[in-house]
Image: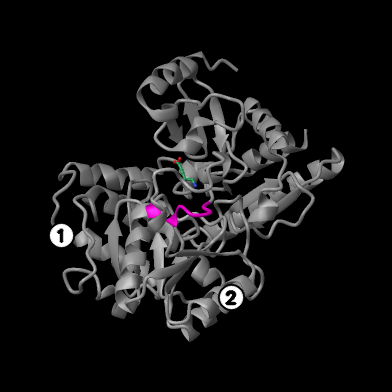
Amino acid sequence: MNTSKSEAMFAEAIKMMPGGVNSPVRAFGNVGRNPLFIKKASGSHIYDVDGNDYIDYVCSWGPGILGHAHPEVIEAVQKAVVDGLTFGAPTERETKLCHLVNECMPSMEMMRMVSSGTEAVMSAIRAARGYTGRDKIIKFKGCYHGHSDGLLVKAGSAALTSSVPDSAGVPKSFTEKTLVALYNDENSVRELFDNNKGEIAALIVEPVAANMGVVPPKEGFLSFLREITKENGAVLIFDEVITGFRLSAGGAQEYYNIKPDLTTLGKIVGGGMPMAVYGGKAEIMKCVSPVGKVYQAGTLSGNPVATAAGIKTVELLMKNPDIYAKIDGNAKKLAKAYEEAAKKNNIAMTVNQVGSLLCAYFTEQKVDDYDKATSSDLEAFSAYFGKMLDGGIYVAPSQFEAMFVSAAHTDEEIQKTCELILK
Ligand code: HOZ
């Protein structure tokens, strides 16, 4: 496979950007390769600048549930663009998107649009603190909620593979109100609530942890979180930046039938444009400025082009609920292929799959938390990644990211992927 143009572009990029990239995981740092520079993407395929064509299971880390450059989404964006790129003033589209989100996730009675998942989470936590008048929050080891200072504690995603669990540059005092519990471990949560009575503003969780690979919640874990937060007067925040509109149109909260107090959305809700949302109980959201005293603002918040892409994407998902059975079924086929390949080649492997999210870990342990996820053999992962890439399949260049299946993946492509996995 010729990647000479990508190599040349990378050599230039590293002079100008740390690692040559604008987000660390893209640097392919832990898989012994240099990143591919992408020219375009369409449907289930992504094409690099050397003309190589890959079946894509990164899907821009989640937004591409309909496949890349869906014609109806592109048309909506093109129509919006000619009227102007940004106004910094209200548009009708923002309210329309709010109604669609509320229809899918009734727990989101009121909401705010921002520009990234990081911003959504940061703002939701501020709202929870303003509402409760308390300072401490609980997060889970291995759950990733963006790169704001207070949340870069035992985070997942690239913070796992870069071997810097807690980022440099974050003052200790900024994270001292962030308490860390163990995912899927009820006792660890109970202990934190018991030891910090009346002090916890919020508990934030990825309902399916998808930044340490893919780790589903144990049965009853999410309802336990619902109960204990209620008992302690703390706000339950579901970080659905990945799971929102992916596990179902109503996200993980519909999939597991749990109603959080606040939710953060990103990725799919912007239809591939930089947009995210936070929202939930009106009583809490009314604490946000200008109604309440919790400040949050942004020039590009509720951007007219991003809202056009988001509206069309959400409408298409709502109109075509069969998509979910299809992508779930295809993810199951892939999971089965991994399991068969592991058996055939006598490789220690555990496969986790929830809806269209999946992850194969190179470990024989059942992966239900951070420590087990990080027991995966990363050299074996690198070898597997190289085999897939050379075979024309683009999967995340990190063990601790999910594999995303989209509605654009055809049966033939799933079959081709299964065959390569089994090779
Ligand atoms: N934190 C994102 C993955 N979980 C980063 C995605 C990107 O590099 O675009």
Magenta residues span 148-155
In depth, the one of 197 and 99 nearer the eye is 197
Point out residue 358 in the picture as x, y percentages from the top left corner. 63, 51
Report which quarter residue 191 is drawn in: bottom right
Q: From where the camera sits, is residue 142 visible? A: yes
Q: Quarter of the image holding residue 128?
A: bottom left
Considering only order in the chain, which callout, 2 or 1, is on the residue closer to the N terminus? Answer: 1
Residue at the (66%, 33%) spot, across then down: 382
Q: Position of residue 420 (x, y in %)?
A: 72, 34
Q: Identify the secondary structure beneath mark 2.
A: helix
Marks 1 and 2 sit apart, C-alpha to C-alpha, by 45 Å
Query: Which numbered disc covers residue 90?
Result: 1
| Left or right placement of residue 348 versus residue 410 in this view | right
For disc 2, does the CB lie below 8 Å from ligand 1? no
Instruction: Give me the residue at 80% from left, 43% from top.
Output: 342
Q: Which residue corresponds to the image point at 32% horizontal and 77% vertical from the top-left?
A: 133
Q: Is residue 334 left or right of residue 268?
A: right
Horizontal placement of 278 versus 317: left or right?
Answer: left
Q: Is 149 covered by the magenta stretch?
A: yes
Q: Find disc 2 in the rendering and name its residue.
A: 191
Disc 1 under 8 Å from ligand 1? The reply is: no
Quadrant where the N terminus lies?
A: top right
- The one nearer the camera, 40 or 135, is 135
Mark 1 residue type: Pro
Residue 132 position (above or below residue 351): below
Neighbours of disc 1 within 10 Å: few (<14), some (14-19), many (20+): few
